[in-house]
Amino acid sequence: MAQPSPGLRAERRRLRKARNAIEAANRRDAENLVVHKLLQLGIGRRGRRLAIYFAMPGELRLDGLTELAPQLGVTLYAPRIVSMRRRRMVFEPVSGARLRANSFGIVEPSDRASRQTGILSFDSIVVPMLGFDRRGNRLGMGAGFYDRALQIRKRRERRWRRPRLIGVAFSCQEVDSITASPWDVAMDLVVTEREIIEPNRSTHHEETRQ
């Protein structure tokens, strides 16, 4: 993957600043609204296999979803970094796992190599975003872990669209346009506290802006 341009680095700094400036009470309200919208999409149906993430500082937290999942009968999985050099991560079950912070300070399941789950086994994957546009393009932190993990979704010979990729972020992280690189994986849906965006359609579900 190519090194980011100075303009892209500046954009990432701007988006991190905007995200970090959200007041605590507003942040909690926004996170709850995002979880509510995710459940509207059916990810909480009993028997579903759902990959989530544990937020790094500043990211939108999914605590409400992780707390509800056992009651709903949803099996949760989360990323674990297995190679920094190759920027490779796998997804492992959350239930019963010993959680620990990795070198980025992100909580992840402990080493359970025999329980790794392939991408195509999931019904949906909830993906953190630093920035996004209305075409479903995602701007991440720049390490490329998710783009590498989700490359199978770009294979042209695949005739189905599983898992569903749902990007989540605060509405202040929207940008006008993101120039996608060949290795970038677009989201099927984008969820913010304000709306559910369907990038591949001309309409989207929008609620009254707070």
Image: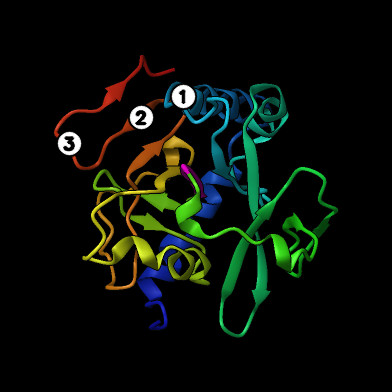
The image's mark for residue 37 is 1
Q: Which residue is mark 3?
A: 201
The image's mark for residue 190 is none
In-front residue for pair 75/62:
75
The number of discs equals 3
Look at the image and tell me in which quarter the C terminus lies: top left
Element on which disc 3 rests = loop
Q: Where residue 21 sits in the image (x, y, percent)? A: 59, 41
Element on which disc 1 rests = helix
The majority secondary structure of the magenta stretch comes to strand
Q: Which residue is mark 2?
A: 196
In-front residue for pair 157/57:
157
Q: Earlier in the sequence, mark 1 or mark 2?
A: 1
Q: Where residue 170 sits in the image (x, y, percent)? A: 48, 37
In-front residue for pair 20/125:
125
User: Of the residues shown, which amino acid type is indicated by label 2?
Assistant: Ile
Instruction: Name which quarter of the figure residue 138 lies in.
Output: bottom left
In-front residue for pair 29/11:
29
User: Of the residues shown, which amino acid type is indicated by label 1?
Assistant: Lys
Q: Is residue 132 above or below residue 62?
A: below
Q: Earlier in the sequence, mark 1 or mark 3?
A: 1
Dots 1, 2 in contact, CB < 8 A: yes
User: Of the residues shown, which amino acid type is indicated by label 3?
Assistant: Arg
Q: In this picture, which residue range is highlighted in magenta? A: 123-127
